[in-house]
Amino acid sequence: MKIVLYDVTIIGGGAIGCTIARELSRYQINVALLEKEIEVGFGTSKANSGIIHGGHHGSPDSLKGKLEWEGNQLWDPLADELGFGFRRIGELTVALAEDQLPTLNALKEQGEKKGVPGLELWDRDRLQQEEPSLSENAIAALFAPTTGVVNPYEACFNLIENAVLNGLNLFVSSPVQSITEGPDNTWILQTPKKEYRTRFVINAAGVFADRIAELAGVRTFSIHARKGEEYLLDKRLCGLVKRVIFPCPTPVSKGILVIPTFDGTLMVGPTAEMVEDKYNLATSSAGGQQVFDFVRNVVPGISARDCIAEFAGLRAVADGEDFIIGTTSKKGFINVAGIQSPGLTAAPAIATLVADIIRDEGLSMSLKDDFEPAVPKPIHFASLPTEKQIELARQNPSYGQIVCRCELITEGEILDAIDRGAKTLDGIKFRTRAGMGRCQGGFCTSRCMELLSRKMDVPIPEITKRGGESWVVKPRTELTAT
Amino acid sequence: MITAETQHLKPEYDVVVVGGGPAGMAAALGAKEMGADRVLIVDREKEAGGILLQCIHPGFGLQHFKEELTGPEYAQRFLEKVLETEVDLATDTYVLDIDKDKRVKLMSSDRGVEIVSAKAVVLAMGARERTRGAIRTPGSRPSGVLTAGLAQKFVNMLGYLPGKRAVILGSGDIGLIMARRLTLEGLEVAGVFEIMPHANGLNRNIVQCLHDYNIPLHLSTTVVEIHGSDRLEKVTVAPVDETFTPDMSRSWDIPCDTLLLSIGLIPENELSRQLNLRIDPVTRGPIVRSTMESSMDGVFVCGNVVHIHDLVDFVSQEALLAGRNAGLYATQQQPPEDNIRLVPGENVAYCVPHTISSDREHTVYMRVRKPLEASVLNLGEVYEKKLRYVFPAEMVNLKVRPRFLHEFHGDTLKVDIVPTAS
């Protein structure tokens, strides 16, 4: 058997790995991506706030502050080409007391220094006019029009779909177990299934980036997990606020936000709690309490009564809190580590930076003539005008069949999602929103399982929520046999 | 099972009924009875019958048919009548939208998108189950945490089991029924946990589904943490005090791979909201007149869309009334308007309907907030009725007869259930 030598292998298929993979797929090089989960975007990327930060929050002296603003400006073409949800809805950083006003001024000044346009200080009257649901205690706010919201998981799916279309070799369920140096400046990566040989390794392993660096013998840092709990609210509250609402930042935190997500529902969070266990994704009653207590001061109309779902994600925090991006003491091993907030915002800028680094390191990279920048925009039946719906349902009856009642998702959309890479119930949910609404899959789970089973030609008991041991049902025989 | 799907819909109907469960079928029959010619039932599933089809246990029909039936049997009796009376039935069809002129936008894979107009509309979409998010149970998010109704569908409709060892959170009727079903299917049910000091299901289900199978019911106890990464591994449970605060010093772990949630139902009111019907914040269903007409003329509502019922027999009764009145509306022969408003007292969570008319008899449904041993139901000062044991899980109903109101000249009556004066 011929052994393939990849030019570049990316470890980790989160937002960072996916953006790098898509950027590198522009070039005439052979790239692989190894992801430990069954689908990309299944770690921190599907459990974060989904905010493209305005560009003014981070100090221009830090790498993350610099890449925040650079990255922010790259999201429009990305979303246009790849058809995922992204909208610049703007943000308000709200002051609830006089002593917070200097912070707003400093933030405005910092943003202007970085070249962030449109920053404005709004007084109480303007605030009440623009966001009448804000607390009367909101005395002023800094408005930033550049802030956007995105579906981060959708971005991952579409980035990777496009990268694969342009030649990326994607390997899922492939955790890297060992990394050794091979002959002629190559690396050998071992997974349970296969061995991969590569000239460059990009370590984009999120909270596990320190472990990956250690496997390669280049560990110079530790990654700590800072957990953030988020709470999704019933769509009854759609439109309560129009912009992302930040509290006035403190030296330790950006605080707890009110986020009108791309899909229109409100989300509140995140908390910030250091955890030892990097698999700890538990939500807590203390966390929920903290979020709702805090948010009530800013938007009094929000209460825990409207919560429909909660989740937690882990930020990858490096010592010193900044991003760690660059070469290491061993040739060909490049770290992209400690990518905490505003990592999602910065991702496209990080990707071009990484491409520059490997070019500087001697990889010959010429652009492909036949690079295809787009993937088809997924059909979203519910948002089409009636005539379009009639036409589509006539052409393809599966678009005339509603599967998810709460979010009005058709069978056709679910079949499309499976064709485009969904392998699990979560894969369907995060691509189509089926199961994400107020009944949380009570009605559509069994239908989605039937569709996955039919399309993938596997029995229903083999369908999982998100891979591994996350099975949903067992056949009668298996339980009664023991 | 007899099923028949209408191939071609008429462009205009007297009454369009949304939902082909027990409420929708009874409403359609009621409309026919009152002379509505063209009646259509729309249901999103492949067969009419609603959630009854997965309720394969007996216990249905004791009031309505005076005999004990299973869910599918109960549904079948109504379906046969529906087909006999030439009601059009569009299954596998979804109502996308209803506008204020009562034009109903439908979608199905067979017929695509189409619009039919109606003189009257009956909303009978039923309810959905409350989920984990609604009670914010702390912990991880493994597979194996599901609502009791979804588990019932897996077991009774699809023939799969949800796991090996189950814990049930909440003592709603579906949870109790599923405790018995899972036991019969060979699973071990470690216990039913209820945060309230009293059970939330019917007493007969506590006896027949738990006691008869030695399944423990832990009152004033709840699940405080969910553990497991891919699949559920265990839950932590703890007793709670009067403010529902768990006492963690007395918590314990229960290994299990399945957690069923039976923590209540919420009326399904997407369409009611689109139509801007006035909603009662307690029932979370539309506010109704004595005719089961909502705040919008010609839009009638019935069954679990209005409030959560404990027996399907009452759903049928209420839906028949809604359907009859929709039929009367469509044929322009409405009864006199309501002239008395009912207001729930301190120990009554809600009453349905919200208004009545002094010229005819009404059945008023209500739920108490707190259980009482010996109690009395007061309808203002015009009527009182002695009740035995009342508790929130069992709906109380009261027949209000015109003669109660002969001497009453006000416009508001307070309905309360209070302890008998000793």
Image: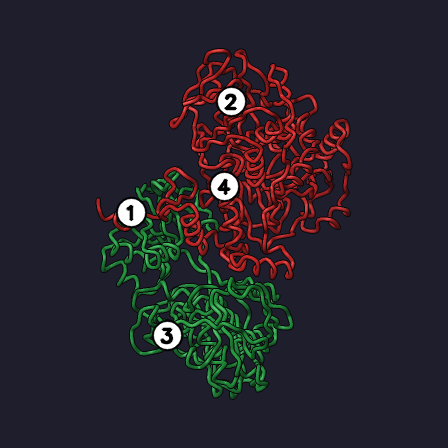
Residue B356 visible to an observer of this rendering: yes
Q: Gap in Å between the C-alphas at discs 4 and 2?
A: 23 Å
Reading the chain from its start, which is encountered first: label 1 or label 3? Answer: 1
Q: Gap in Å between the C-alphas at discs 1 and 2?
A: 47 Å
Q: Chain of mark 3?
A: B
Circle 4: residue type: Gly
The residue tagged 3 is B387
User: Which residue is pictured at 68% across the width and 25% down the height?
Assistant: A66
In the image, A370: left or right of A30? right
Residues packed near mark 4 inside 10 Å, few (<14), some (14 to 19) or many (20 plus) = some
Task: Note the chain letter of the green one.
Answer: B
The residue tagged 4 is A421
Q: Nearer the viewer, mark 1 or mark 4?
A: 4
Is B190 rendered above or below residue B139?
Answer: below
**Image spot of residue A387 (x, y percent):** 65, 61
**Image spot of residue B353 (x, y percent):** 51, 74
The residue tagged 1 is B165
**Marks 1 and 4 on same chain:** no
What element does badge 4 sit on?
Answer: loop
- Front-most of residues B22 and A30: A30
**Marks 1 and 3 on same chain:** yes
In the image, A215: left or right of A407? left
**Image spot of residue A425 (x, y percent):** 45, 46
**Image spot of residue A276 (x, y percent):** 45, 27
Residues packed near mark 3 inside 10 Å, few (<14), some (14 to 19) or many (20 plus) = some
For the C terminus of chain B, give its image quadrant: bottom left
Disc tally is 4
The residue tagged 2 is A6
Task: Note the chain letter of the red one.
Answer: A
Residue B421 visible to an observer of this rendering: no
Is B65 rendered above or below residue A213?
Answer: below
